[in-house]
């Protein structure tokens, strides 16, 4: 009888410790977060501004993440861009050494987008919205898809 109770206690202890690790902050592992990023993300807002048609005209910026290759590509509203992607624990992200095509672009949209991208230090995905942040403050937000 004592052995049965001991085995039951060990089974409960083992089961509860396994299930709690799935719900812990470590459950949102870096690899699962990187899987969520692997998509095309269309710009939704920049510096809190949502009516972006005047700023970017016909071509809206987007980012395409390839976390396995540690690369990002996309469009800044006028020119194509690409570069290395660095993602670290704590949802830290950086877009250093980005390159882009050199087509002449009307307006300020391209420079606004690139300046904002250079300020990004971390990110979060909340209800299907990718928020690029600078020290916790939203710089840009994107939605998954071609919008």
Image (tube, helix red, strand yellow):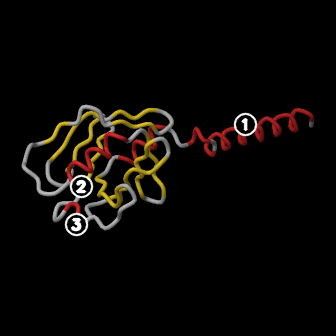
Look at 35% across and 65% down and name the residue there.
Answer: 50
Question: Which callout, 2 or 3, points at the residue further toward the start of the chain?
Answer: 3
> Which residue corresponds to the image point at 25% horizontal and 53% vertical from the top-left?
62
Q: In which quarter of the image is the N terminus?
A: top right
Find residue 119 and report its image quarter. Answer: top left
> Front-most of 68 and 40?
40
Q: Which residue lies furthest to the front in this view?
A: 107
Mark 3 / mark 1, whichever is N-terminal: 1
| Residue density around tag 2, few if under 14, some if 14–19, many if 20 or more, within 10 Å | many
Q: CA gap, disc 1 to disc 2?
A: 49 Å
Q: Where is residue 40 in the image (x, y as percent from the top left)?
A: 28, 53
Q: Residues within 10 Å of mark 1 (few under 14, many from 20)?
A: few
On the image, the x and y values in percent for residue 54 come to 22, 66
The Cα atoms of the two marked residues, 2 and 3, are separated by: 13 Å
Which quadrant would the C terminus be assigned to in this image?
bottom left
Q: Earlier in the sequence, mark 1 or mark 2?
A: 1
Q: Distance between the residues labelled 3 and 1?
A: 58 Å
Choose mark 2 or mark 3, whichever is in front.
3
**Left or right of 3: which side holds 96?**
left
* Disc 1 target residue: 14
SS for dot 2: loop
**Residue denoted by label 3:** 54
Residue that mark 2 sits on: 61
Q: Give left or right: position of 2 versus 51.
A: right
Labels 2 and 3 touching (C-beta < 8 A): no
Viewer-side residue, 6 vs 143: 143
Q: Which of 11 and 57 is in front in this view?
A: 57
Quarter where residue 121 is shown: top left
| Residue at 37% in and 53% down | 140
Count residues near mark 3 (Cα–Cα under 10 Å), then give few for <14, some for 14-19, many for 20+: few
Q: Please identify, in this view, whether the residue under mark 1 or under mark 2 is nearer the observer.
A: 2
Which residue occupies 11% across, 53% down?
105
């Amino acid at each position: 009888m004592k052995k049965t109770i001991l085995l039951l206690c060990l089974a409960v202890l083992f089961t509860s410790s396994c299930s709690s690790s799935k719900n812990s902050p470590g459950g949102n592992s870096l690899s699962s977060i990187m899987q969520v990023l692997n998509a095309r993300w269309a710009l939704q807002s920049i510096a809190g501004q949502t009516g972006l048609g005047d700023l970017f005209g016909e071509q809206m910026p987007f980012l395409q993440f390839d976390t396995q290759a540690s690369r990002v590509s996309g469009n800044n509203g006028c020119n194509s861009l690409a570069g290395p992607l660095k993602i670290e624990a704590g949802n830290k992200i950086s877009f250093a050494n980005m390159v882009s095509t050199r087509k002449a672009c009307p307006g300020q949209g391209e420079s606004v987008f690139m300046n904002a991208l250079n300020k990004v230090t971390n990110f979060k995905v909340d209800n299907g919205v990718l928020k690029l942040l600078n020290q916790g403050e939203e710089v840009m937000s994107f939605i998954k898809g071609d919008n």
